[in-house]
Every structure is written in structure tokens, then in C-alpha cells.
Image (cartoon, helix red, strand yellow):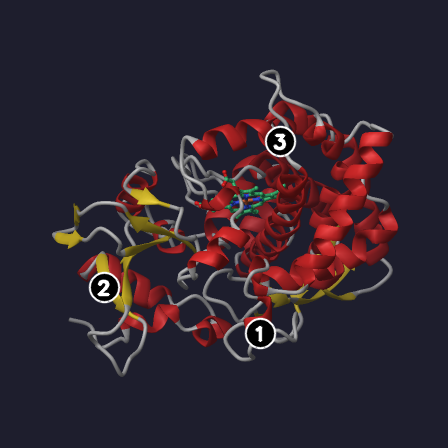
Amino acid sequence: MSTLNLDSIIDPDVYTSGVPHDVFKTLRDEDPVHWTCERSDEPDGPGFWSLTRYADIVEASRQPGIFSSAKGIRIEDMAEDELIARTTMMELDPPVHTNYRRMVSNPFHRKEMKNYEPELRKMAVTVIEEAMGRDKLDFTIDIARQLPMRMLGSLLGIPDEDGPWLVAAGDALIGNSDPEFTEFVVDQVDTDEYRLLPFRSPVSLKLFEYAGKMAEEKTKCPAHDVTTDLLKPTRDGDRLSDLDFKNFFTLLVAAGNDTTRYTMAAGMQALLDNPDQLELLRERPELVESATEEMLRWGSVTMHFRRTLTQDYEMGGKTLKAGDRAVLWYISGDYDERQFPDPFKFDITRTPNEHLAFGLKSPHKCLGEHLARWEIRILFEELIPRIKTIQSNGPIDRLRSNFITGIKHLPVKVEWK
Ligand code: HEM
């Protein structure tokens, strides 16, 4: 057995030095369904099952009736009142989830998203041209951070001037364990007074208020945007309630912001570390689609989602008991040698590439996947032809989180064409 601390994967500080791939590999090889103890001083204390192999993660994802999302999708348990107050579609199981998803999914279909391509491209070009005035940049802050929220904002029909505030709000929600993004660091300060709010953060109240105003406005003056579509009844006559809309809006701001940003940053970092792949993409721009998929796999930025067992279940020679938590480590599955040949090679031609970054085979598979793909693809399509040379320009800085892996700061030196 390995001498590595296999339970270190839960420690948010570990991720500030990078994803502990050596630990995940050992888990995949030696104990793929591993009981992870939450407290090192209490080996028989509270814990959860860590699923680290691709096949096991897919097997669990396909069975939401057994691997339920209803008790929460983050590792930490929530009290019943917290769970009720903070439930979004992510914490619903079929059939309730199926109905909800039907109400919100239309505007996010691939062909709907394609209609927004010219707008997204224009925005990417604006952000890149703004950056082109300088030869030293923080790729994450100056480019990747600017795009997803502005793009989502434009789709939702949000005025441009509200963009920066929404970016900061999204950061405070998802980055709630990193002091750079919030003063309400969940595991460091007492956030009890906010326990009934999404992400245990007071910022969500402001987002609720903002969403309420948006709904009022778009009901009065419908426009060609996703918010207007979301407020319309579906073909079956179902319509989101006021509270549902506010919750969904808050979820979009949280889910559609830094996930895409950090995938862009992971992709850039991978190109910097693998100059042959950067050259290949420059020579064969038609590879941008498979390059995007490889960036998604490589980054796998939402590292896990949690489920709770509704009945006993055998997996990997272990008996998972009803009520136990099971954490699906997508980041580990995406580097599983059993699924991906040579997984630690960044290969923009990789096909097939059925990665787990969006939560494959789950009814919760990312609703924003097509938007995220467009955003990443368009960025690199517009960026690479404008660059003569690019290299890293100092150490990177990573997010403190066991949930999202992200390069917060990526200094680069660029020679523009
Ligand atoms: C590269 C960027 C992204 C990544 C890696 C990502 C990842 C994920 C994953 C893994 C899930 C599944 C959750 C589960 O298994 O329980 C998910 C769900 C979701 N994502 Fe994304 N996401 C990204 C971008 C976006 C964007 C741009 C949006 C918004 C437009 C979005 C909105 C959502 C929503 C609403 C859900 C919940 C779906 C449901 O419960 O049915 N995501 N995302």
C-alpha cells in the first residue's frame, strides 16, 4: 500500500499546489472505492466513499435513483432546513428534476446557442483587442475572467455595465473557500447567519434582488434573450415560479462563470507547457473542436460532485450503505488510464474523448455545456492567429478549493502580430 496520505484529497490547501494526481492515481490502482476519513485524528469518524475510476463514476451517474443528489452535491452535509432553503435543480432527483429541467433547457440547446455565435465572437474579439495593448498579461484576469460572465450576461440580456459586478458576485459564491474572493470563507469564519442562503453567502441575497428586477423588466418588455425565454411557459404550460427563477438565475451566475474561466486558463497553461500542441493548433485551426474537448478533460475544473446512497450497493468489492455519501471524482476519472490512453499527455487530436468534465451520463449533465464549448472554442479561434509568441512569465497561483480547480493568476508574455 502507498505511503501517500490518501485522504489528503479533501484538504482545500492541497489544491493550492495543484491537483494531487499522484494520490488519485494510487487510489484508482489500489483502492478505487475508498473510504475517505474527514478527520485524520478520527479514523473511524465521519467520512465518505471516494469513487475514482471512470467506469464506477459513470455507473453511479446513470443511477440517480440509487446515487441521489437530494441530500446535497457538495461533500459537507447540510441540515434539513438549509437543504430546503438552498435547493436548486442540482439537488433534485428525477422525476421532479426532469420536469424542472424541461422548463429551463430550451434556450441552452446546441442549436439555440449557435444563434448567439456572432455576439459571442464579437465580445471575444473586443476582450482580446483590449489586451493587445500590453505585452505582459495575467491571462486569467485579463482575458479568461472577462469572457464567460460577459457572454452569459449578454445571452441573459443583462446591461454591459452590470457585468463586472456579476463577475465579482459569481466569484464570491463559488470561491467561497478562498479569501481572495470573499470575506466569508466557509471553513475559516463563522458563516452561520447565512446558512440558509445559497453557498452560505450573503452575496446571493443581492443576486436574488437583481434577478427579481430582471424578471419584472423582461415580463414588461420581452426581448430576444434567454431570460425572456425562461420566463415563458413551456409547451405543456409549465412556468417557473418567481422563487424558481431567482434560484435559477443565481445558479447560472455561479455555474457559468468561473468553470469556463478556469477551463480557458487550464487550456492556455497546457498549450504553454506543450508548445508542439500550440504549434499544431496554429497550423491546423480545424482542430479547435477536439482541442476544446481536450482542454475540458485536462482541466476537469469541477473536480467532484457528491451523491447519497438510497439503498445498499456493491461497488469495487465494497458495500456502500444506504445513507452513505459517495463522491464522484470527475478529475480522477478524466485521467483514468483504463479509459484514456496516455492520460497525462495533452493531445489536442485525442478522439474519442468522452470526458467527465460536464458529468457524463447523469441527468444533471451540465446544462451550459454547449455555451461553455462555444466560449472556449471562440476564444482560442480568435486568440491564436493574433499571437506571434507566448510564454509564461512567472509563477501561477491556484484557487484554494477541493471543489473547483482553477489557475487564478497566469502571468504570460506575449508578442502580438
Ligand atoms: C467549462 C465549463 C463548465 C463545466 C466544467 C461545468 C460542469 C458541470 C458539471 C460537472 C455539472 C453536473 C453536476 C452534477 O453532476 O450534479 C454541471 C451542471 C450544471 N451546469 Fe455546468 N459547467 C460548465 C459551464 C456551465 C455554464 C456556462 C453554465 C450556464 C450557462 C452551466 C450551468 C449548469 C447548470 C444549470 C447545471 C445543473 C444541471 C442540472 O442539475 O440538471 N455550466 N456543470
**Does the beta carbon at disc 3 come under 8 Å from ligand 1?**
yes
Against 383, is 415 above or below?
Answer: below
Amino acid type, residue under disc 1 in the picture: Val
Residue shown at 49%/59% (left/top)?
82
Against 320, is 1 above or below?
Answer: below
Q: Which mark is residue 108?
A: 3
Nearer to us in this view, 361 or 217 = 217
Against 235, is 367 above or below?
Answer: below
Residue receiving disc 2 = 35
| Residue 139 visible in the shown view | no
Q: Position of residue 398 (x, y in %)?
A: 56, 70
Q: Quadrant of the N terminus?
A: bottom left
| Residue 318 visible in the shown view | yes
**Foreground label between 2 and 1:** 1
Distance from disc 3 to disc 1, alpha carbons, whole Å, reads 32 Å
Mark 3, secondary structure of its residue: helix
Mark 2, secondary structure of its residue: strand
Nearer to us in this view, 14 or 395 = 14
**Foreground label between 3 and 1:** 1
Amino acid type, residue under disc 3 in the picture: Phe
Q: Position of residue 48 (x, y in %)?
A: 28, 62
Which is more N-terminal, label 3 or label 2? 2
Extreme residue toward the left, this view: 317
Q: Crowdedness of circle 3 by 10 Å Cα count: few (<14), some, many (20+)?
A: some
